[in-house]
Amino acid sequence: MKKSFALLVVCMLVIGLLAGCGGGDKKAAAPAAPAADKKVFVNLATGGTAGVYYPLGGAMAEIFNKNIPGMNASAQSTGASVANINLIKDGKVELALVQNDIAYYAANGTEMFKDKKVPVIQGIASLYNETIQIVTLEGKGIKTVADLKGKRVAVGALGSGTEANARQIMEIFGITYADIKPQYLSFGEAANGLKDGNIDVAFVTAGAPTAAIQDIAAQNKVALVGIPADKAEALIKKYPFYAKQTIKGKTYPTVTADVQTVAVKAMLVTSEKVDADLVYKMTKAMFSNLDRIKAAHAQGGNVQKATALEGMGIKVHAGADKFFKEK
């Protein structure tokens, strides 16, 4: 009886060992499907085909597709920053190129996003400067922002990012719309107004040199109004999406000296709902292939890791944060 019981135990142990070995072999033969076997679709909202965002977005999509296994990224032409943020909010795109001040307004429910807060918006990286240029003509007697009092000032289209920039900058100097004669004009309208003598000064938010200003400078002596360092610092403290900027002398023919001003940033944003590991891989791929970004547009040469968190007025996505914290 004892021998039979012992034999039974031995047999059970042998069977168990064989089963365990068989199970191990089976597991090794059928590993979990690697990430490369899964297609990941990413839509990137850019801007108009004639602008900067579209070629940069196309370059980014190309980089993602070449460097991330299973990636199927595509850049699509869209409207402006506000439209792109709404696409993120509605889950229609995973990535978008926008101005950082517009992203800040969306995240905080202010300005054009008042009562329409977009809490899911998160940042990946700041890319390059969109310079605030305060443009006038020689002979207008406008040397500082304080001189804008009583003047006809083109502050940008009503509800635009430029209009918010103008209002915030004047606020730091203690100037309100009650102190000036505000003109709600687009870049093109402001340029024509300066040339025709219908306005005295204009706020323009765009990469320098700006075609609209170059057009004025072709036949007029353009002057730029600077923002001193202490005022810039006060502005940045209150509105963290701004960054200091220098417009180099001779950017426009009649402006020979460097001019200190501020800038907002073009930036890449996403939704908090997008997987952190995926955002990490996309961030790493982009900053590992900056030569392709540079080749896409002249502004791409200003994209660099060292300045990627400057003017970041919204929460950084966990995936991007992981990349920037790596040594």
Image (tube, grey):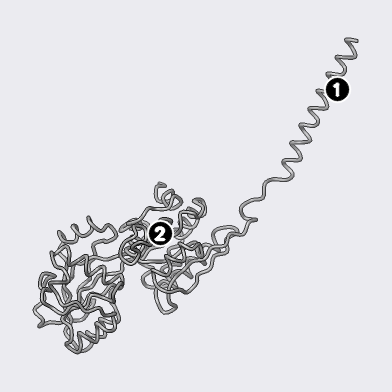
Q: Which of the marked residues, 1 or 2, is nearer the chain's N terminus?
A: 1
At numbered mark 2, what does the secondary structure look like: helix, strand or loop? loop
Q: Nearer the viewer, residue 248 or 30?
A: 30
Q: Secondary structure at mark 1?
A: helix
Label 1 – label 2 distance at C-alpha = 66 Å
Q: Which mark is residue 82?
A: none
Q: Nearer the viewer, residue 308 or 43?
A: 43
Side (left or right) of 231 relative to 277:
left
Q: Can you tell which quarter of the image residue 19 is in?
A: top right
Give the residue at x 42% y 70%: 83
Quadrant of residue 117 in the image? bottom left
Residue that mark 2 sits on: 118
Q: Is residue 255 visible?
A: no
Q: Amino acid at mark 2?
A: Val
Query: As shown in the figure, which amino acid type bears the numbered disc 1?
Result: Cys
Residue with the mark numbered 1:
11
Q: Quadrant of the N terminus?
A: top right
Q: Residues within 10 Å of mark 1 (few under 14, many from 20)?
A: few
